[in-house]
Image: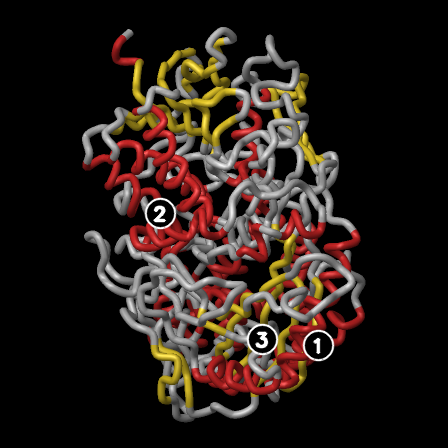
Amino acid sequence: MINRRDALARVGLIMGGAVIGAEFFLSGCKNTEKKDGASFSEDDIALLDEVGETIIPTTSTPGAKSVKIGAFMTMMVHDCYDDKNQKAFTEGLSKLDEASKKKNNASFMKSTPEQRTALLNDLDKEMRAYMKEKKKEDAAHYFKLMKELTILGYFTSETGATKALRYMETPGRYDGAFPYKKGDKAWAT
Amino acid sequence: MADQTFDAIVVGSGISGGWAAKELTEKGLKVLMLERGRNIEHVKDYVNATKNPWDIPHRGKNTQQMIKDYPVLKRDYTLNESNLDYWVNEKECPYSEAKPFDWFRGYHVGGRSLMWGRQSYRWSDFDFEANAKDGMGVDWPIRYKDISKWYDYAETFAGISGSIEGLPQLPDGKFMPPMDLNCVEKDVAARIKEHFKDSRRLIIGRVANITQPHNNRTNCQYRNKCWLGCPFGAYFSTQSATLPAAMKTNNLTLRPFSIVTKVLYDKDSKKATGVEVLDAETNKTYEYKAKIIFLNASALNSAWILMNSATDVWEGGLGSSSGELGHNVMDHHFRCGASGEVEGYEDKYTFGRRANGFYIPRFRNLFNDKREYLRGFGYQGGAGRQGWGKDVAELGIGADMKEAMTEPGKWTIGMTGFGEILPYHENKMYLDKAKKDKWGLPTLVLDCEIKDNEKKMRTDMMNDAAEMLQASGIKNVKTSDNGYTFGQGIHEMGTARMGKDAKTSVLNGNNQMWDAKNVFITDGACMTSAACVNPSLTYMALTARAADFAVSELKKGNL
């Protein structure tokens, strides 16, 4: 526990304020151990928070870690994935760490943000090549699953929808020629 | 028992049942409306209608448990955690597929009026005359002139927004102001009109969403969450429109959890005397008596009730004397069309979520056009800018990808055809007495398929869509046929058709059963052909018309 806290604190310093995100999952991930299907440890969730944050980093708007993306991913894998993709995803956690050690001589958690970004860009290319070649019945590449869940979880979260995007619950009218200039945000829904 | 006797009984509380209850109660009859499922109270029970996307745990994705519990519903967009409670429990209510059939059911007060697509179009005489002209099925006993004032009446009360177009194949109606086409759709509409010399036209969908306040209902707020139930009552449903009107008369009794197992039939008077009800909660059986019965349980279930009724007189059930009960099942085939990308309009976007799209009325086999298949199809589609889900694969991961995803992408446009299915006698449903539902009742077997006529039509549905998009300057146009399973259009029709002759039809021109003149069927079962337009508005008009006839016959002492 202490090691993980330390690791996260370090990441927090490096990333400039992501520690708040870390606190979320420390309190919010106690129910992910399930008897059936995929089960995840707190370390897994911590790792996925960082994977998510590397995919959708904090910029002028909050990153994926701020929406507890690790807990979201594990919940979705547990509840929504079939056995095949659950297996691909859970095995992917260690594959990702192995790939990190091979490329960066460090586990993903101990890598710098630059190293993480470089690794995940490699995995993104590997994933796209794999998805092109794979047979229909094969499981998806684990990084495709992680990336998809990060994007889904982030942009449908309150932070993603209202800060990274625009959201209006009750528009009240329709304008089919609404002025737009480059840089204006997309609607969340 | 006196309290079990009514002037009229309405079986089912969906679009047509709600209308029957409204019309009959407003004409002064004491009416019992029976609904097999639970009650859903307007607004109060629309539990997800005001939630934000992040309040939906799996953000609308299917869980493995849902996929396991809903083996039919999962076949299409219909399976969704945000309105899962509006769909039938498949384990309790099984059916069998002699051929693949997607039967998407809603067993609760309001039925599918809560989840319907709300597209509302009139039929024309091209449709009412079609069977007579090409010899398929039997002739409709009515023509457009017989129903046009009832369309006026139904539209005026339901609240249909749409544009006046002057098209013979898609008659205009009593519309509320239309919703707007967006800038790209307007451009494509103008180009189609010019290129095809106005023989094809792209118009805004005619939709049962009100665009002005109406009968204590608030106009559409452009949230596009209709299928969760509307807290503004902005679209037509039993709950928002017909049920409050019927309740206001103090003549309506609504009984949920009431599975009608049979129509009670008296051999001597040759009339129905009432219905038998199985209470879905207590399993107790009740009898309710009435002078008039309206069956509005949905096409397949109304026929199911008849097949279980008066079997001591007719082996095939009440209404089976013609041999057509349960036959001629129809739907609309769709899911094939074209899509493409739009150049330009980068300085334009949309504001609000329009729960409607464009419509391209039928143009095949009309006027001087002649194809190698019968009947035709219309298109439903829309244009919009891609949102955060767009593919930005080339950007990999990180800040650039994130920024790209937070901006809208290109404009795209797509459409799918909705084609007419012919009334084939051999497309049928029948009872399986060995396979029982949760209440020990016999279940349905569905045995239906599309044939060459529909398959040939699908080629046109793809190619004509592509041709129109290309003629409009759309780039990267792609055709697609995503396959169609019978039932998927959720427009089941034809199981107790109207006709001119008791030997070849179940109902006469007033939706009155030939075999029991105080029984009326005004849901999809009554349809003699399917046309290519969405059918619910026609059920509304036929229901109001039949209710008017039934009450006048009752007053004359003819029922």
A66 and B481: which one is in front?
Answer: B481
Compared with residue B424, is residue B185 higher up or lower down, i.e. above or below? below
The picture places residue A126, in percent across and down from the top left corner, at: 72, 76
How far, Cα to Cα, is label 1 from label 3?
62 Å
Q: Residues within 10 Å of mark 3 (few under 14, many from 20)?
A: some
Q: Chain of mark 2?
A: B
The picture places residue A11, in percent across and down from the top left corner, at: 45, 76
The residue under label 2 is: B237
How far, Cα to Cα, is label 3 from label 2?
32 Å
- Judged from the image, the secondary structure of the residue bearing numbered disc 3 is loop
The quadrant in which residue B514 appears is top right
User: Which amino acid type corresponds to the residue marked 2 in the rendered image?
Assistant: Ser
User: Which amino acid type corresponds to the residue marked 3 in the rendered image?
Assistant: Arg
- Judged from the image, the secondary structure of the residue bearing numbered disc 2 is loop
The picture places residue B468, in percent across and down from the top left corner, at: 63, 79
User: Which amino acid type corresponds to the residue marked 1 in the rendered image?
Assistant: Lys
A2 and B369: which one is in front?
Answer: B369
Please tell me if label 2 and label 1 are on a single chain.
Answer: no
| Residue B516 shows in this picture | yes
Q: Quadrant of the N terminus of chain B?
A: top left
The residue under label 3 is: B200
The residue under label 1 is: A102
B531 and B258: which one is in front?
Answer: B531
Side of B424 relative to B509 (left or right): right
Q: Residues within 10 Å of mark 1 (few under 14, many from 20)?
A: few
Residue at image position (66%, 21%) is B435
Assess whether mark 3 and mark 1 are in contact (beta carbons under 8 angstroms): no
**Numbered label attached to residue B215:** none
Q: Earlier in the sequence, mark 3 or mark 2?
A: 3
Q: Chain of mark 1?
A: A
Give the number of the mark in front: 1 or 3: 3
